[in-house]
Image: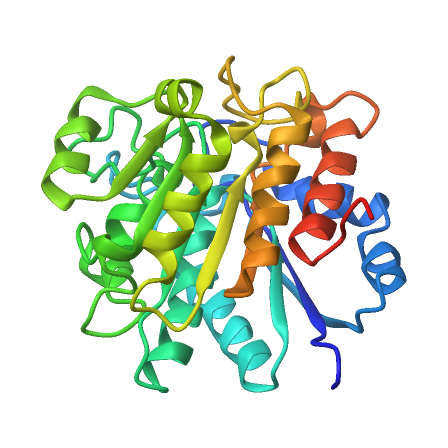
């Protein structure tokens, strides 16, 4: 049986974020030798190229409640096509970000692939934040705080329809792990949509293993597989200092690996985003090194 290739896609964009720098995240992950280390696992590596955006100084900001909307839409459309290409050739997309708004492109590409097979897609979202704001509720207008709402078919019509007339994912197939920072209006949207959010408080009370099991059940029941979208700010800043929106109280180094290992062990994982790495805030590329190690765990690397 042939080993599924890992298809690497770099997305150099920070337009969805509140501060500059995450557009350099893919380069830092490359410096940490992601391609060579995936190959050392025995997986073939396919390079599907990079998606670039124009500099913010040359792009129209647009509406204050959805900054750089047009450029972000263009990037997500291009990424969507690359993810579909990877899946069509039987490969496992590994998307290196870039701010978390790029998940609208990667998840939509996955959703379209599964829809062509008559299947639903599950989504496992690792993040300190729920990223479920709408333009009218966002306090910042930064689109990296809105991708989940758009994937659920809400918000700006062109972003909400990246996967076609149907939403990319159903709320019943979405689970979030590690949440500990939620805007006031976001709480209302979580309740309205019914997305299952495992906060750090619940994880502390019940234990990580139990919450991961429940989350995996949600994203795999009634789906043809699930996509893992991993924001590095889900990890505690002690272990991942190089992120744009650090929130204390996140996952430890070992807990982050456990999530990726459990996702790989389940067998239903069909693709991965690793996003929000900001090298300008990192310490000796430590967060990039962690990102590569987490990617390896999601691709099946184990201790024994």
Location of residue 36 by image quarter: bottom right
Foreground residue among 220 and 153: 220
Image location of residue 255, percent across then percent down: 60, 30
Location of residue 42 by image quarter: bottom right
Foreground residue among 303 and 167: 303
In the figure, 187 relative to 103: above or below?
above
Kindly identify the residue that appears in the image at 78 percent across and 20 percent down.
Answer: 283
Count all numbered tags in the image, as a single digit. Answer: 0
Foreground residue among 140 and 296: 296
Left or right: 158 in relation to 280: left
Q: Can residue 70 be seen in this snapshot?
A: no
Kindly identify the residue that appears in the image at 66 percent across and 15 percent down.
Answer: 238
Left or right: 238 in relation to 36: left
Image location of residue 296, percent across then percent down: 74, 51
In the figure, 302 relative to 162: above or below?
above
Image location of residue 156, percent across then percent down: 20, 53
Image location of residue 27, percent across then percent down: 75, 46
Location of residue 294 by image quarter: top right
Kindly identify the residue that appears in the image at 31 percent across and 67 percent down.
Answer: 162
Foreground residue among 107 and 146: 107
Where is the N terminus found, in terms of image quarters? Answer: bottom right
Kindly identify the residue that appears in the image at 54 percent across and 59 percent down.
Answer: 266
């Amino acid at each position: 049986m042939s080993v599924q290739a890992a298809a690497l896609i770099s997305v150099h964009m920070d337009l969805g974020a509140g501060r500059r720098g995450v557009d350099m995240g893919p380069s830092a992950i490359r410096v940490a030798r992601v391609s060579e280390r995936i190959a050392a696992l025995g997986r073939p590596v396919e390079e599907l190229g990079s998606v670039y955006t124009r500099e913010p100084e040359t792009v129209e900001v647009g509406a204050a409640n959805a900054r750089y909307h047009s450029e972000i839409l263009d990037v997500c459309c291009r990424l969507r096509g690359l993810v579909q290409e990877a899946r069509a050739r039987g490969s496992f997309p590994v998307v290196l970000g870039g701010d978390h708004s790029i998940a609208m492109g990667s998840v939509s590409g996955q959703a379209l692939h599964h829809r062509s097979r008559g299947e639903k897609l599950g989504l496992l979202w690792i993040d300190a934040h729920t990223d479920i704001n709408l333009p009218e509720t966002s306090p910042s207008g930064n689109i990296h705080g809105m991708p989940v709402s758009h994937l659920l078919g809400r918000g700006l019509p062109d972003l909400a329809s990246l996967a076609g007339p149907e939403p990319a994912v159903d709320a019943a197939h979405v689970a979030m792990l590690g949440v500990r920072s939620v805007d006031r209006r976001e709480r209302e949207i979580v309740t309205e949509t019914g997305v299952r959010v495992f906060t750090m408080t619940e994880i502390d009370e019940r234990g990580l293993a139990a919450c991961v099991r429940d989350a995996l059940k949600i994203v795999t029941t009634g789906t043809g597989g699930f996509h893992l979208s991993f924001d590095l700010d889900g990890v505690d800043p002690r272990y991942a200092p190089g992120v744009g929106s650090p929130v204390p109280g996140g996952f430890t180094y070992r807990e982050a690996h456990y999530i990726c290992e459990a996702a790989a062990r389940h067998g239903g994982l069909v693709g991965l985003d690793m996003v929000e790495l900001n090298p300008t805030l990192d310490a000796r590329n430590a967060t990039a090194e962690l990102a590569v190690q987490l990617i390896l765990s999601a691709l099946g690397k184990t201790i024994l």
